[in-house]
Amino acid sequence: MSAADTLIALSRDPRFSPYAMSAVPAWLWAPAEQRLLWANASGAALLGAPTPAALAEHRYASDDPLADEIARVAATLPPTGAPRLGQVQLGTHKLTCTCSRTALPGDAHGVLIIGSEPMRPALPLAERAARLFSPGSQAVAVFSADGKLLYATGELDADTTLATLGADALKSEAVAAGVATGESAIGPLTLMRLGRGGTTVLVATHDRDMVDRMRRRVLALDEGRLVRDEASAGYHDESTSEFAVRVRAEMGVGDEGHTNGEPSS
């Protein structure tokens, strides 16, 4: 798994999810490995990195001042995970932060550092979403809590909303329960809540492998047109683009949406 995909997976962890989209910088460090495991976009930006993934790919030398500071903070934290408030020198920034010891797989532990106030100037919420998700390998769309599109790895119109995708019911369930999966205008959709309060977002994924396993109804859109509607199908039987090309050929429809040789009526 790439650093970006690991970061996104950790962002879904209940311990880090509340801070995933926050303007308050947050980091999870692995002192024993002298590296960062997770950060939100605000935390990455404060340390001069364009994305959290870029920051996670950096390795710190044993004599690096930042590695020394994290080791110092780690030594002051109780093993119970109880948080402590203190001053932390992160690069050129001396911040008041809440720090706690956090269990990691195996017997390892990390140091979770949460700033006490938002960075200035704060990144817009849409920019935070883009910086977190753009390096990842999975196609996602990120919506605000009221259903407006903030960021998408694919090509979605800027005015796309969860309502236009027929996912209003899923939105309400995801906001309340944290996650919701069900049907939408583009087939099975999963919405997962990240953040909290005013930084709550809903991350939408359209899992093709899940569709193939379920063999349920598949709807596919091509350039805004419904080109596929099958009661029992799988995406891997034929890609959406391949299906669209075949349908256009069978219908005599060209790339501009008109029948070949004749304007549409």
Image (cartoon, grey):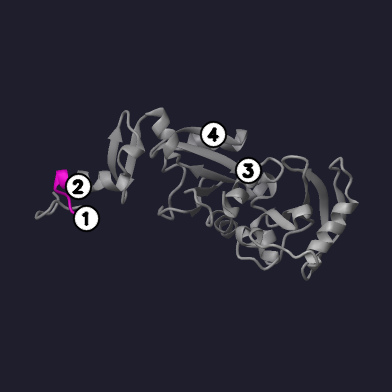
Which disc number belongs to residue 227? none
The magenta-colored residue range is: 248-254
Q: Which residue is mark 3?
A: 12
Residue 171 against residue 76 in the figure, above or below: above
**Can residue 153 be seen by looking at this rendering?**
yes
Label of residue 248 in the image: 2
Q: Along the horizontal axis of the image, is 42 left or right of 202?
A: right
Q: Which residue is identified by label 4? A: 180
Q: What kind of residue is marked 3?
A: Arg
Type of amino acid under label 2: Arg
> Front-most of 37 and 204?
37
Q: Which residue is mark 1?
A: 255
Mark pair 2, 3: CA separation? 40 Å
Q: Are marks 4 and 3 in contact (CB under 8 Å)?
A: no
Label 2 secondary element: helix
* Residue 30 visible in the snapshot: no
- Mark 1 / mark 2, whichever is N-terminal: 2
How far is the residue under mark 4 from the one under mark 3? 14 Å
Tell me how far mark 1 sits from mark 3, CA to CA.
40 Å
Asked if marks 1 and 2 touch (Cβ < 8 Å), the reply is yes
Q: Are marks 2 and 4 in contact (CB under 8 Å)?
A: no
Give the quarter of the image for residue 57: bottom right
The residue under label 1 is which amino acid type? Asp
Helix, strand or loop for disc 4: strand
Q: CA distance from mark 1 to mark 2?
A: 8 Å
The label nearer to you, 2 versus 4, is 2
Give percent across and percent down for residue 161: 46, 47
